[in-house]
Image (cartoon, rainbow, N blue to C red):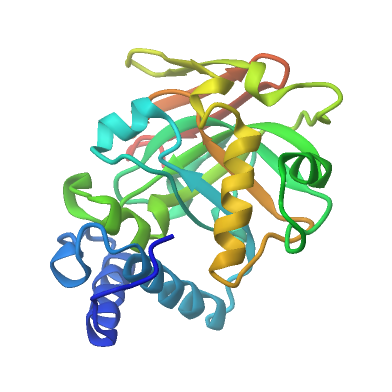
């Protein structure tokens, strides 16, 4: 994590206000990098934390985190070169085989991921991989519905971090496994989206191993003063390329060893 920031408190607040306006009006806004820079990590997370505090004070309930930009394919799609993370709230969860239309999304795209549910905190110790594995209670297949409040997904690293790592919604499979039953780095994935080329990948596409991604998150979250806690859901990152999910589309992800999960985006006419 970078240790210095050149952005002012006023710039952070203005960036947060711009993104809040997008949420309030359901209208994408210009990027915020003119205010906080494209690569100022601390400023970008300061904006994200400002927005998170506002949501929590408004009654939202945080239920976990999402790791983004872990797959080389997604990094290439968005022109970035490092992972990031955001916060998951309870109103972001969509039931398996549910519809994303109620999630107030602006520009939804989907990616298939391995999700974990923690049974232990990751707040103390060296946070070595063995400790991280021990903290995992359940593993599930997931579809993350990414969304950007920035018009046209015109984002740099700073823009997406500030915008809660482009988090939108998520769907977890009903089937759950333990790490004794499935090894996340060894899974293979295929995601179909109506009318689009399939997205394919495997566990190694996620920083080499979804558990390495979880370890990265545990260390970053603790460094920012908000360590991972038991009960949290963590979306560990994409296993293959992201795909748009326009109205009328259905996305289904199958992850070998974890089963399948589906989400719909009903058309304007049928909503």
Give the mark count: 0
Query: Which residue is at 23% across, 72% downward?
Result: 18
| Residue 254 in the image, given as x and y percentages of width and height | 60, 17
- Measured along the vertical axis of the image, is residue 161 above or below residue 137? below
Q: Residue furthest bottom?
A: 10
Q: Residue furthest right?
A: 180
Query: Which residue is at 47% across, 25% downward?
Result: 251
| Residue 51 in the image, given as x and y percentages of width and height | 42, 73
Of the pair 40 and 22, the residue shown nearer to us: 40
User: Is residue 248 in sight in this rendering?
Assistant: no
- Measured along the vertical axis of the image, is residue 24 above or below residue 218? below
Query: Which residue is at 22% across, 46% downward?
Result: 153
Of the pair 184 and 20, the residue shown nearer to us: 184
| Residue 256 in the image, given as x and y percentages of width and height | 66, 14
Quarter occupied by residue 110: top left
Residue 268 is left or right of residue 192, and the answer is: left
User: Is residue 224 in sight in this rendering?
Assistant: yes
Query: Which residue is at 54% across, 83% downward?
Result: 57
- Measured along the vertical axis of the image, is residue 167 above or below residue 242? below
User: Which quadrant: the C terminus?
Assistant: top left
| Residue 103 in the image, given as x and y percentages of width and height | 46, 52
User: Which quadrant: the N terminus?
Assistant: bottom left
């Amino acid at each position: 994590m970078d240790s210095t920031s050149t952005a002012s408190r006023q710039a952070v607040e203005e960036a947060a206000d711009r993104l809040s306006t997008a949420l309030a009006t359901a209208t994408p806004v210009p990027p915020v990098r003119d205010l906080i820079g494209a690569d100022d990590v601390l400023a970008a997370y300061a904006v994200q934390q400002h927005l998170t505090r506002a949501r929590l004070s408004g009654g939202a309930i945080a239920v976990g985190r999402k790791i983004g930009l872990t797959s080389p394919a997604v990094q290439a799609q968005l022109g970035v070169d490092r992972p990031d993370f955001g916060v998951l709230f309870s109103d972001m969860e969509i039931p398996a085989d549910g519809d994303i239309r109620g999630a107030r999304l602006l520009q939804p795209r989907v990616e298939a991921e391995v999700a974990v549910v923690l049974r232990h905190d990751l707040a103390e110790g060296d946070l070595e991989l063995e400790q991280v594995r021990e903290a995992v209670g359940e593993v599930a297949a997931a579809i993350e519905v990414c969304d950007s409040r920035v018009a046209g997904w015109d984002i740099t690293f700073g823009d997406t971090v500030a915008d809660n790592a482009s988090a939108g919604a998520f769907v977890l499979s009903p089937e759950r496994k333990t790490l004794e039953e499935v090894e996340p780095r060894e899974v293979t994935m295929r995601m179909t989206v109506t009318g689009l080329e399939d997205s394919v990948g495997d566990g190694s596409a996620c920083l080499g191993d979804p558990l390495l991604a979880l370890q990265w998150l545990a260390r970053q979250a603790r460094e920012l003063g908000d360590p991972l806690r038991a009960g949290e859901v963590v979306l560990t990152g994409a296993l293959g390329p992201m795909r748009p999910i326009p109205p009328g589309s259905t996305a289904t992800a199958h992850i070998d060893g974890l089963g399948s999960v589906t989400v719909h985006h009903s058309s304007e006419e049928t909503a």
